[in-house]
Image (cartoon, rainbow, N blue to C red):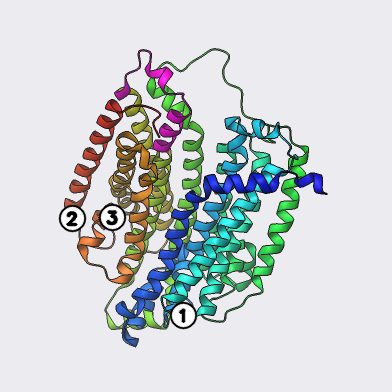
Amino acid sequence: MTSRVVGVGPLLRASLRQEARSFAPWILIVTVLSTSSIIVYPWVFPTEESRQQLAATIGANPALAIIFGPANDLSTADGFNTWRCLALGGFLTALMAIFVVTKASRGQEDSGQAELLASGVMSRATRLSVAVLMAAIASLVLGVVCAVATGLCGGDWQAAWLLSATFTASGWMFAALTAVAAQLGSDARTTSTLAVATLGTLFVARGYFDSIEAPSWTNWLTPQGWMEYTQPGIDNIWWPLLLAIAFTAVVLVVAFTLQARRDFGQGAISPRPGPAVGRVRSSSALAWRINRSPLISWTIAFLLLGAIFGTLATSVPDLLAGDATISGLLASGAITPDDIVGEFLVTMLSMIGIIASVGGVQTMLKVRSEEMDDRVEPLLAGAVARTRYYSAHIVVALVGPTIGLLVAGLMVALVASSSDLGVSFGDVWLQAASIVPAAWTVVALAVLVVGARPQVEIAAWAGVLASFGLTLLGPTFGLDDWVLGISPFWHVPHLIAGPTDWTGLGWITLFTIGFIAIGTLGFRRRDLARV
C-alpha cells in the first residue's frame, strides 16, 4: 500500500508552494459573494415591506432560479445569503477544483513536466493523488475562510459553516469527476471540456428543476440538488454532506482504477489525427482550426440551452398563478402578465449573452496560451503579420458568441411564440440579436487585456464577472443606474418588456471598437511570451 503513494508528500508540498497563489482569487470571490449578502441586506431591506417586495420581485422572475436556486426564505440575512450564494458559490468552487486537477494532472503530461517527475522515486498514482489533494485543500481553505468571514460580518455561525461546507463539498465532488475526465481525455483541453460540460449540464438541470418547481425528489438527481437540501439558515440540515463525501470516494476509486490501466500521455478518447498534407494557408484558417471544436461544442450547447429556456418560458404563467404575492400585484394592476413574461425573457436572454461571452474570452486566452507555448513566434517570424494573426482570432472570438446567441434566441423564439404568451417570434429573436453587441464588449475587454497587458490575463474575465453581478444581482440591491451601467448588458433595449432606446448600444459599440483597437495595437508592439 505504501508503494502506491510514494512521493505524495514532497510533491504535494512543492506543488502547493507553486500553485497556492492561484487559489486566492477564487477564495476572494466566493467570500465576498457571501459576506456582501450579510452586510448589505439590512441596509437595502430594513423593513418587512421591503423584504416582501424583494420576495415578489424574485418570485416574478423564475429565470433567477436557474442561477441562484429557490428563494425559500428572504426574510432574514442568512436566508437571503443562502439563496444568493449556495448554488453560485458551489459552482465557482467546483470550477476552481476542475482547473486545479486538470492543470496538475493532464496539464503536466502535455507540458512534459509529468515525464520528468515520473523519472524520480514516485509511484504511478502519485501525480493524480497530488492533483486531487490540491483541489481538496483549496476547497477546504475556501470553505473555512468564507465561513469565518461570513460569521464575523454578522451571519449566523451555524448557517455560515453549513453554507461554506456545501462549497467545499462541491469542490471535492467535481475534483473527483475531473480525475475521471483526466483518464478519458487525451489532453488537458479535452479533460477540462469534459469536466466543465458535466458541471454546466448538472447546474442547468438543477436550475431547470428549481424554475419549474418540480417535485422534491428531483433534488436528488444532481449533486447541486443535494446541497440545496441542506437549507443553511433555514433548517440547517447537515447529513446531505455525507452523500457528497461518499460520492467523492466512489468516483475517486473509479478514477484511480482507470488511471492504473491508462497509458502515459494517452486517454480513452483518442485525438483525431491531422491531415497528411497541410491545409492551413491563412491566419483566419489557423484561428478557425484552433478553435473549431470549442465553437461547435458551444453551438450545440446553446441549441439545447435555447430549447430548455424556451420550454421554461411557456410555464411562466402556471408558475406565477400559485404565488399569492404575484397574484395580488396582478390584481392591483401594478404589473401585467405581459410585463412579467417580457422581463423573464429579457433576463433569460441576457444570461445566455453572458454565457456566450465566456466562449469569446476563452478564445482570446487561447491566443495567450499558444504564445506561452512558443507556437506563435515561429509563425510571426515568417510572412504572417502580427495584426493579421491577432485580428483573425478576434473575428473568431466575436463570431462564436454571435452564433451562440442567435441559435439560442432562435430556439427560444420558436418555442415561446408557439405558446400563448403574447410574444411574437420576431420580437424574441430581435431581442436576442440586440444582446450581441453587449457580448462583444465583454469579449473586447479580453482582446485589450491579452493584446496590451497579458501579464494580468485574469483581468480578461472582469467583463464576465461584472456583467453577471450587475445584470443579475445589481437590481436586487437597488444600485444606482450609473453603477448598473458598468455592465454592457444594462444598455440593451428591452424590445419585449418596455420602450425601445438604441442609444445605449451605440455607446457600448464605441467602447468595443476602442478596446479592440488598443488590444490590437498593444499586440503589435509588445514582446511575445513575456510573463
Q: Is residue 496 above or below residue 101?
A: below
Q: Earlier in the sequence, mark 1 or mark 3?
A: 1
Res 20 seen here: yes
Q: Quadrant of residue 189?
A: top right
Q: Residues within 10 Å of mark 2 (few under 14, many from 20)?
A: few
Q: Earlier in the sequence, mark 3 or mark 2?
A: 3
Please report the residue visible at 22 percent of the width from the left and 47 percent of the height from the top.
508
Dot 2 corresponds to which residue? 501
Answer with left or right where residue 505 lies relative to residue 102.
left
Q: Amino acid at mark 2?
A: Asp
Numbered mark located on residue 73 in the image: 1
Q: Amino acid at mark 1?
A: Asp
How far apart, in angstroms, are the residues tagged by discs 1 and 2? 36 Å
Please report the residue visible at 50 percent of the width from the left and 64 percent of the height from the top.
87
- Magenta segment, which residues? 363-387
How far apart, in angstroms, are the residues tagged by discs 3 and 2? 16 Å
How far apart, in angstroms, are the residues tagged by discs 1 and 3? 28 Å
Q: Residues within 10 Å of mark 1 (few under 14, many from 20)?
A: some
Q: Is residue 387 above or below residue 446?
A: above
Residue 489 lies, in percent from the top left, at 29, 54
Nearer-the-camera pick, 100 or 231: 100
The secondary element bearing badge 1 is classed as loop
Nearer-the-camera pick, 299 or 68: 68
Dot 3 corresponds to which residue? 487
